[in-house]
Image: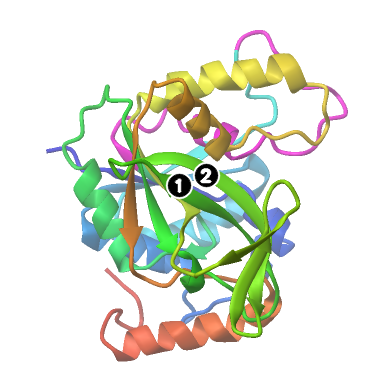
Amino acid sequence: MVKPTLLVLAAGMGSRYGGLKQIDPVGPSGEFIIDYSVFDAKRAGFGKVVFIIRKDIEKDFKEQIGSRYEGIIPVEYAYQDLDDLPGDFSRPAERAKPWGTGHAVWAARNVVKEPFAAINADDFYGRNGFALLADWLTGKDLNSTDFTMCGFTLEKTLSEHGTVSRGICTRDNDSRLSDVEEHTAIGRTDGKIGGVNGKGDAVEFNGEEIVSMNMWGFTPALFPHLERLFTEFLTERIEEEKSEFYLPFAIDELIKSNISRVDVLHSKDNWFGVTYKEDKPRVMASLAKLIEAGHYPTPLKG
């Protein structure tokens, strides 16, 4: 049986961190957040890792990150390139901003031939989410346009050092995804969790809402649909210097047009991310607790 592939969106790592050399370790033996994702994916049953990177960080990325997994799990690469566009489209000369997460996943179309999970490189998702995705993806029909998303409990994704933006998920009666609405300025005030919806209205949450943290499960059948939707996006917006083709937008279009159904998996784990530099000590402390409880070895190998 074909094992699923882990697709890691890492093209933005150099720009977000000011260069790969500035990536801070968070584990007690110098581990990066991505090391824990690869570890969790491998033990959940994923058979390969594909990193989406940029050509200009290729050498540093392979030396500093990709080499860490030699002899542990097969690693391949795909490249997000501003000039990699469908059909006869050409990049406008003034375009410098990446085309977005939808374009990043589409960049893997010639490398990924198996059912796959897509994640961010710099988010800690925890063991449970990878196990849920591996179970859902293993043996999946490659031609199926039914996909999945692993969501997290809102209160387990907040920062103590500032507000965050989150996509609040709505499910239908069959527990499938019907909508993801982006909310901003989410944080705790006087013991309550509040934020702002897309209309600018203040919203209060109970903390149990399921949010999307960009942890998806797909089949290769996604790629032709991404190309079609990206083509439509470029037709309308190619001259907008800062417009981006987002993956959640593409999935929403597939749901609304009845092409795809998206099962919502629910991880009970805490999500960690370094949204603010002050978040790093909390991430390190949380990982230390997981290691102490026996969830991860140190150093993290195998």
Mark 2 = which residue?
180
Question: Quick check: can you spot residue 46?
Answer: no
Most common SS among magenta residues: loop
Task: Look at 24% across and 50% down and name the residue there.
Answer: 134
Quadrant of the snapshot with the C terminus: bottom left
User: What is the CA distance from the residue labelled 2 to the residue labelled 1?
Assistant: 6 Å
Residue 87 falls left or right of residue 46: right
Image quarter of residue 230: top right
- Give yes or no for residue 102 being in the magenta stretch: yes
* Identity of the residue furthest to the left in this view: 1
Instruction: Where is residue 212? Give x, y as percent.
Output: 48, 53
Q: Is residue 222 above or below residue 57?
A: above
Q: Is residue 28 above or below residue 232?
A: below
Give the class, few, some or many, for how many residues have Cα within 10 Å of label 1's Cα (few <14, many ≥20). Answer: some
Instruction: Where is residue 98? Give x, y as percent.
Output: 70, 38
Label ID, residue 170: 1
Question: SS at mark 1?
Answer: strand
Instruction: Where is residue 214? Give x, y as percent.
Output: 49, 50
Residue 133 falls left or right of residue 196: left
Report the amino acid beneath label 1: Thr
Q: Earlier in the sequence, mark 2 or mark 1?
A: 1
- Asked if labels 1 and 2 touch by Cβ distance under 8 angstroms, the answer is yes
Task: Look at 28% across and 40% down and name the residue there.
Answer: 174
Instruction: Where is residue 48? Give x, y as percent.
Output: 31, 47
Report the amino acid beneath label 2: Val
Residue 116 falls left or right of residue 243: left
Q: Is residue 300 above or below residue 132?
A: below
Residue range in magenta is 87-116
Of 116 and 194, nearer the camera is 194
- Give yes or no for residue 2 being in the magenta stretch: no
Image quarter of residue 72: bottom left
